[in-house]
Image (tube, helix red, strand yellow):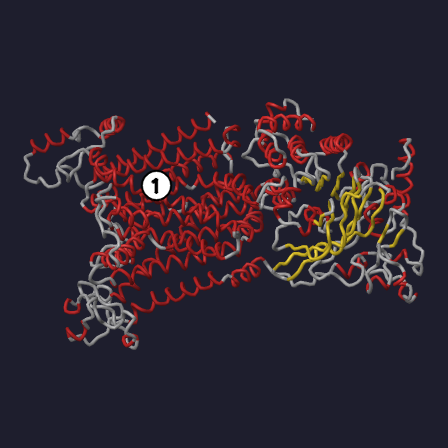
Amino acid sequence: MMAKQQYEQLSPEWFQPAPPNVGEQEKINRPSLTFWQDAWLRLRENKAAIVGLVMIIILTLMAIIAPMASDRTYKDQNLRHAKLPPKIPVLEHIHWLPFDGRDANGVDVYKQRGVKEYYWFGTDDLGRDLWVRTWYGTRISLYIGLLAALIDLLIGIAYGGISGYYGGRVDNVMQRIIEILNGIPYLIMVILFILIFEPGIISITLAMVITGWTTMARIVRGQVLKLKNMEYVLAARTLGAPTSRLIFKHLIPNVIGPIIITTMFTIPSAIFTEAFLSFIGLGIRPPEASLGSLVNDGYKSIQTYPHLMIIPAVVISLLILSFNLVADGIRDALDPKMRK
Amino acid sequence: MVEKILQVNDLHISFDIHAGEVQAVRGVTFDLYKGETLAIVGESGSGKSVTSKALMRLLPTPPSRIKQGEILFEGKDLTKLSEKDMQSIRGAKISMIFQDPMTSLNPTMTIGKQIMEAILKHQKLSKDEARKRAIELLQLVGIKNAELRMKQYPHQFSGGMRQRVVIAIALACNPKILIADEPTTALDVTIQAQILELMKDIQKKLGMSIIFITHDLGVVANMADRVAVMYAGKIVEIGTVDEIFYNPKHPYTWGLLASMPSLDHKDTELYSIPGSPPDLLNPPKGDAFAPRNPYALKIDYELEPPMFQVSDTHYAATWLLHEMAPKVEPPAVVRERMKRFADIVARKGGKPRG
Amino acid sequence: MARYTLQRFVYMIITLFIIATLTFFLMKLLPGSPLQNQEKLTPEQKALILKEYGLDKPVPVQYIQYLGNLLKGDLGVSFQYDNRPVAELISDRIGPSAQLGFQAIVFGTIVGLILGIVAAIRHNHWEDYTATVIAVLGASIPSFVLGGFLQYFIAVKLQWLPVAFWEGFKYTILPTLALSVGVIASIARFMRTEMLEVLSSDYILTARAKGISQAGVIIKHAIRNSLIPVITILGPMTVNLMTGTLVIEKLFAVPGLGEQFVRSIELNDYPVIMGTTLFYSALLILAVFIVDVLYGVVDPRIRLAGGKK
């Protein structure tokens, strides 16, 4: 143990009692952050999520502006301009970029056919402008994503909330229905719906209304069931809080995290489903364009005009990737425990 | 004096986290004698669990690291051993029991396999011999139908039974030291008593030393030979159980004793130590307990107190023991309790241990 | 365990029955019949044909007949392929699809597990980051896009492997690869999360406190326990795989069930669409059932308690 001598020359003055002011040390010296501020701070630190967010903003702006800013529309055909490779001003001079208007054999098709205009992404076999069609297709993808999120929020939350809140027999019946719905493969359901109605955006929308919300309903139900029996909710109930107060002050703030996370993951999977359906010819029909049908069209001439497939394929992949990155980021930010 | 089996000298452990360095253990020194039970008590976050895991080198590195100090066991410094050498000590010479028996057994492996795993790792036995040994161990910890139980999974055992299994695993190789990290905290009170009795029994039979981590002073009084009180990563007082209970010197120990609930104490309100432990990310200057200490001196805010010797076995780190300090009596509640402890011991007819 | 299996089995039968019923009434709603292209027939001839298909009876009778036929494995006949039985069309085409699906799930599971385990063990090291990037990309790039890229760069540009068709193992490599990326991504993700959770659990600490080596702890305790929940995603995985075969077979001209299904959709060949739909549903429900039972077998908590987690 330590030697005593080295402390011998201490001043007696120091041995005056100095009891602490108890109230003082209970002061909280870090600024307190709300749940959302804290989550935003965490999200901001997630570089992948921020990159995803920026990409979504860029893609969305392009989808809104590009078709409006162009004097061509998605369905204008110009057979004299069919199958042109991409050509973009300025970038055309950087020879290793595929935007110089030359085809696979290195022939400058624009010069050969005397085309003065620039088609930034080239044209398809009917001479439609791929630039406009790609961004038009992006609009459809975004619409589908938004729609899926909306359905999740409206039907899924209501269904799950009612099922979980009332419990008992109501819950039992509602859960059996979901179980059966889940037993039927989602895609098969969508295909059946599309067969009855005509392929197109309305059929896809309808199919999603019927089947797209079950995951959300289950998650909301699970959360509500869990929270309903939490001590603090029971406490509020014993204190006579009305149902509306319980729902708005206790249940919703606690369920909102999982809801946002589920919604964020619904969007990319809905975008994927639409692209997939359009790819196998069940979704958007020509002359309208969806990224899935554009990839399918482009695929037919992959050997000679690869840009027809590659450009929409890259855009759809970027779109789904960005949403996945943001969804991952939001999950990590809202639920640090789930972060692994 | 009895043989020292383990010596911990000036142990410092830090965790490197995002915000900086958390100094969880800041210079812990103690010895463990052969066959004794040393209790380490303190609030959550006092560093008692970290210390115990560090003895086994079970802390994940990173983020944790042993910054300084040594852990001497059988002539070796455990802080410097390779992971491989450490593996031959863990489970064989030093064993550990954890807090929650519900989660500390592998749910998909039979009890028998989990015990045999420890035996086969350290002893040159055949599978059959290991099985026999495992059955013996289960019987030793008081599990009936041991042969049948061997084939069962943890979820088929109650909490108390699981903790017995955990103890059996820890005893598999007759360890010299058993570290018990709050082994009864997660159990019902009646089961707690059974487990404590079992541990005392086994210690008598096998003669190992026990380091008992707890925040429950009742358990300490029941189990321990010596007690180390930890606060903010340091031992603030250490002594025999009688010294700590009859003659505590550190104001923090006074606070702990005063906050112990007791049945025959209806008249006074339960005491609680004001405030909360300091942030070990930025430990305060001087005595870490000063901001909560009603007996604080000016010097407490400037200089850390050294360990003052009270008796051969009793040390405390408080400036109140300095000759220039004003003489302070423990608060009335504590004095009364000290007296009552003495009475209890007198009633039991035993002499104070030590 | 027996009760649990029985309960799952009953659910499976109910779901199948509902799907069969749904399919039948959807058929009734759909335009198109065997008489589609035969406008010039006399009413007598039409009646004869309807009688032949059993369409002259009232709908409830047809429904009973349909259910009876289903039990016998009779899925009706195709409108387009010379009135061939749908069941025969399916059994002709199932081979390549099964091979493709099997190869993809085996390859994808092995690679996914390795990635997930390595990522968890090397948490927050470059191996972890690499595995995470692969998983995110794999989950984001649609299989038809990936298939197209593989085809263009590896088969067309580099000419390492055949572009399409189904004439030997070499032909299966690219479609298997395209199909397995989704499997790799979800298994790797799931395994990593599970493994990290298990590694931070108390019983891992107990195992380490016994003196078991790092490798022993990971192999004997961590991997086994993380694998159990991974079994649960094999059910949904089969669904994704099936979705995948639809486009991959179309892309690589594989003469499989998916390719036939897509074509029958293009041709409005309803009996084939319905039959295949039913077949797919049955397959998937069976897969989910097997996964559920398997889960019970592997996890002693369910096996011995007889309940669901």
Query: Between residues B120 and A257, which one lies in front from this camera angle?
Result: B120
Query: Between residues B242 and C46, which one lies in front from this camera angle?
Result: B242
Residue C276 in picture, x, y percent from top left: 25, 38
In the rendered view, does B186 fall on the left or right side of A153? right
The part of the image, by quadrant, that contains residue C41 is top left
Query: Between residues A20 and C246, which one lies in front from this camera angle?
Result: C246
How many numbered marks have been drawn onto this rendered protein structure? Answer: 1
Residue C113 in picture, x, y percent from top left: 44, 45
Residue C7 in picture, x, y percent from top left: 43, 28
- Crowd rating for badge 1 (residues with CA inside 10 Å; few <14, some 14–19, many 20+): many
Chain under numbered label 1: A
Secondary structure beneath dot 1 equals loop
In the rendered view, does A132 fall on the left or right side of A21? left
In the rendered view, does B234 fall on the left or right side of C201? right
The part of the image, by quadrant, that contains residue C275 is top left
> Which amino acid, by three-letter code, is at mark 1?
Pro
Q: Quadrant of the N terminus of chain B?
A: top right
Q: Which residue lies at the image location 74% right of the left edge and 33% below the top edge? A: B199
The part of the image, by quadrant, that contains residue B207 is top right
Where is A168 relative to B21, above or below? above
Which residue is tagged 1?
A: A185
Q: Quadrant of the C terminus of chain B?
A: top right
Residue B96 in picture, x, y percent from top left: 68, 40
Where is B163 relative to A222, above or below? above
Query: Between residues B295 and A229, which one lies in front from this camera angle?
Result: B295
